[in-house]
């Protein structure tokens, strides 16, 4: 066995040994995250919700072993720093205590049924990136600082961030409900299938709007009103679900999938 | 009239040959009745010849021609007298009135259909929108808010629904969409009041920024007080305070 191969195998075993998991069956079809840092949500063809703290820091948690967290009213029922429980039809997920984004002890991979509806809220600066992949359910995100990356999603969705950017790669644009993306200070970058049908409303007060898609612009006379910012209203492929994109201070990129 | 009488008349008209007339004379010499008959017809013809024939003068001819031409002209273009003018006008007025009534009935039916169709469509749009606003899904509620753009003249109920959504909806994105939708009703004082009220009670920073921008663009001077309140609030996050300060400058510049 070569030394390099040995090192790779050893590293993998170490990571696997550190990973801690928690699994639960959701009662309804909605999962709600409240102030959970460094979240990576992946849709899969199963029914359970599986939490994995990939880089579980044994030393960090062992130091607090036998003690009770007394600066939080939330109880850690997962042993990975989270409170997870079904309340009504919603699976509620909350982070227990204060954990900054630099702490690798809290970095979650969460596997969920791909058709589940997701709600994610985060108000502080340490949310870090939010990644959501392979979800056909409705996604609602309200954050202040997270950068948001969505891949292989279909909508509907309502995404809002103040200081974060938003990148969305649509697998398809479902003709179910509206898609609303709002960032105050950062860019919004959308990739759509070339045949996506949508009624679009793009607005930026201080940025620019770029696209390589065949947009039928309906408000050409109003595209350069300085006092109101730049606004594009039109449709793609004859129109469809509402696609509302608003980036106050930065650019909007609307591109077709290659 | 006998055969002899016809011969006598032909002779007096110059149409009987001489031999036939000699034969009749010879007969009259033998028969006194024939002689008397010849004398009676001669006398009759003399009387006829002596009749004084009065010829019409040229004025009569002119009058006749004038009268004839007048009749011809009248036959072509009936003369409108005051009496028949009134008759014609009455008939024309009745005809026009009937046409107008028919047209009005037709137009009324058509316009009623248009109004009914529009009312139905408006009613449906309004019902759909108000129903969607009650949906659990945020995307559906945003869809409802966006429907207000398609309603040409949203009524008070729709505007109030948007205001309630702005003030009470639990989703940030839905409240943001409502603020944007309401911003087009610049002249509506209820909307302006609602936007100011929303700014005073709103906790989400992104919506605060949107409201500050909308109120500044509306040149809503009453918002100045709210802006100054945010600027003076140590608990407000810096970027919202910066936006409020920017909004304040816009209001002062445009005042």
Image (cartoon, coloured by chain):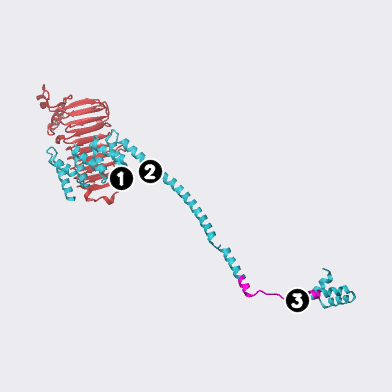
Q: Is residue B3 found left or right of A210 in the rendered image?
A: right
* Residue bearing the label numbered 1: A235
In the depicted structure, whether residue B187 falls above or below residue B235: below
What range is drawn magenta here? B41-63
Give chain A's shade.
red
Q: Is residue B10 found left or right of B229 in the rendered image?
A: right
Q: Are marks 3 and 2 on the same chain?
A: yes
Q: Quadrant of residue A199?
A: top left
Q: Quadrant of residue A109?
A: top left
In reply to whether residue B55 is colored magenta, the answer given is yes
Image coordinates of residue A135 in percent, x first then y, are 26, 34
- Picture quarter with the C terminus of chain A: top left
Q: Report the chain holding disc 3.
A: B
- What's the magenta bit mostly, secondary-structure-wise? helix
Q: Nearer the viewer, mark 3 or mark 2?
A: 3
In reply to whether residue B184 is colored magenta, the answer given is no
* Residue bearing the label numbered 3: B49
* Residue bearing the label numbered 2: B118
Task: Identify which residue is drawn at 40% across, 45% down.
Answer: B114
- Picture quarter with the N terminus of chain A: top left
Q: Nearer the viewer, mark 2 or mark 1?
A: 2
Chain that is cyan in the image? B
Q: Quadrant of residue B27?
A: bottom right
| Foreground pick, B125 / B78 | B78
Give the secondary structure at mark 2.
Answer: helix
Image coordinates of residue B241 in percent, x first then y, are 14, 42
Q: Nearer the viewer, mark 3 or mark 1?
A: 3
């Amino acid at each position: 066995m070569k030394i390099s191969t040995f090192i790779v195998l050893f590293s993998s075993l170490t990571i696997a040994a550190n990973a801690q998991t928690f699994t639960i069956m959701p009662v309804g079809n909605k999962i709600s995250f409240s102030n959970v840092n460094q979240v990576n949500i992946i849709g899969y063809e199963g029914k359970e919700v599986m939490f994995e703290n990939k880089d579980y820091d044994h030393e960090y948690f062992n130091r607090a072993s036998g003690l009770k967290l007394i600066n939080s009213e939330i109880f850690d029922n997962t042993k990975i720093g989270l409170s997870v429980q079904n309340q009504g039809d919603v699976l509620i997920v909350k982070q227990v205590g204060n954990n900054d984004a630099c702490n690798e002890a809290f970095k979650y991979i969460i596997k969920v049924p791909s058709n589940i509806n997701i709600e994610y809220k985060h108000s502080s600066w340490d949310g870090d990136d939010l990644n959501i992949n392979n979800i056909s359910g409705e996604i609602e995100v309200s954050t202040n600082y997270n950068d948001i990356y969505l891949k292989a999603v279909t909508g509907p969705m309502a995404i809002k961030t103040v200081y974060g950017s938003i990148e969305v790669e649509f697998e398809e644009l479902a003709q179910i409900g509206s898609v609303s993306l709002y960032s105050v200070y950062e860019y919004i970058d959308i990739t759509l299938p070339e045949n996506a049908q949508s009624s679009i409303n793009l607005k930026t007060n201080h940025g620019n709007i770029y696209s390589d898609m065949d947009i039928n612009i309906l408000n050409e006379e109003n595209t350069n009103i300085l006092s109101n910012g730049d606004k594009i209203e039109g449709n793609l492929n004859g129109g469809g679900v509402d696609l509302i994109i608003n980036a106050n201070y930065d650019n909007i990129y609307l591109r077709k999938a290659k | 009239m006998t055969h002899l009488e016809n011969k006598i008349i032909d002779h007096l008209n110059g149409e009987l040959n001489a031999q036939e007339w000699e034969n009749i004379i010879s007969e009259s010499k033998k028969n006194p009745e024939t002689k008397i008959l010849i004398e009676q017809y001669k006398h009759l013809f003399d009387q006829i010849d002596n009749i004084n024939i009065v010829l019409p003068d040229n004025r009569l001819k002119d009058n006749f021609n004038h009268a004839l031409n007048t009749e011809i002209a009248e036959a072509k273009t009936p003369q409108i007298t005051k009496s028949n003018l009134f008759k014609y006008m009455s008939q024309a007025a009745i005809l026009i009135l009937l046409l107008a009534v028919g047209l009005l009935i037709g137009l009324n039916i058509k316009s009623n259909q248009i109004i009914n169709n529009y009312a139905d469509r408006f009613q449906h749009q309004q019902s759909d929108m108000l129903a969607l606003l009650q949906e659990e899904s945020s995307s559906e509620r945003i869809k409802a808010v966006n429907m207000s753009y398609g309603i040409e003249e949203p009524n008070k109920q729709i505007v109030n629904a948007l205001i309630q959504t702005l003030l009470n909806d639990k989703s940030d994105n839905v409240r943001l969409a409502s603020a944007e939708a309401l911003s087009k009703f610049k002249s509506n004082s209820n909307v302006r009041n609602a936007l100011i009220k929303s700014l005073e009670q709103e906790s989400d920073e992104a919506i605060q920024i949107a409201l500050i921008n909308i109120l500044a663009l509306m040149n809503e001077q009453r918002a100045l007080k709210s802006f100054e309140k945010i600027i003076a609030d140590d608990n407000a996050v810096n970027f919202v305070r910066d936006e409020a300060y920017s909004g304040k400058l816009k209001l002062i510049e445009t005042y």
